[in-house]
Image (spheres, rainbow, N blue to C red):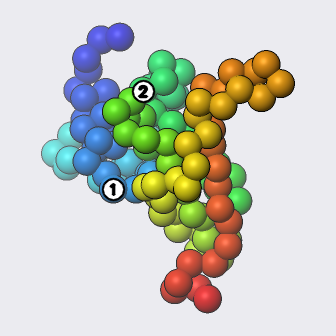
Amino acid sequence: MKATKTRIEVLNLLQKSKKPLNHSQVMEMLPGGYQWDRVTIYRTLSEFEDRSIINSLLSKERITYFEIKNIKAENHSHLICDNCGSIECLKKDFIDLSSLTINGFKVKTVEILYRGLCKSCQ
């Protein structure tokens, strides 16, 4: 994969972000002074996901959010508000499920989403 300006900037943005971002948020948060192409950003995010550089989450509204995959970090779950759509990372899961074997099936990754109402929407 070639290190293009778009790929570098998108990767830097996702690495610095404290929460998952959707395509529109990525477009808005990329540095100004450059004409960012909407389709190129979509393709960049898709390629990063295909190469397991980033993870994606699908919201109730069918909006895809992206976050950097950190191989040194522990697995973590996400809290998604059904009202406002906010997403929060739950940094520490209660049980490490990534080393499970279930019926002879070796689990490599676990994705858990908690849905409900955030503090602001309760």
Helix, strand or loop status at disc 1: loop
Q: Amino acid at mark 1?
A: Lys
Q: Vertical placement of 20 versus 85: above or below?
A: above
Residue under the point 42% across and 34% down: 69
Q: Is residue 65 visible?
A: no
Residue under the point 61% across and 40% down: 97
x%, y% of residue 72? 34, 33
Q: Vertical placement of 71 versus 59: above or below?
A: above
Q: Residue furthest top?
A: 1
Alpha carbon of mark 2 to alpha carbon of mark 1: how far?
Answer: 16 Å
Is residue 103 found left or right of 111 in the rendered image? right
As rendered, which of 83 and 77 lies closer to the eye?
77
Residue at mark 2: 53
Mark 2 or mark 1: name the one nearer the start of the chain.
Answer: 1
Quadrant assignment for the N terminus: top left
Is residue 105 found left or right of 70 in the rendered image? right
As rendered, which of 5 and 76 lies closer to the eye?
76
| Dot 2 crowding, Cα within 10 Å, few <14, some 14–19, many 20+ | some
Residue 18, numbered label = 1
Q: Residue furthest right?
A: 103
Is residue 120 found left or right of 16 in the rendered image? right
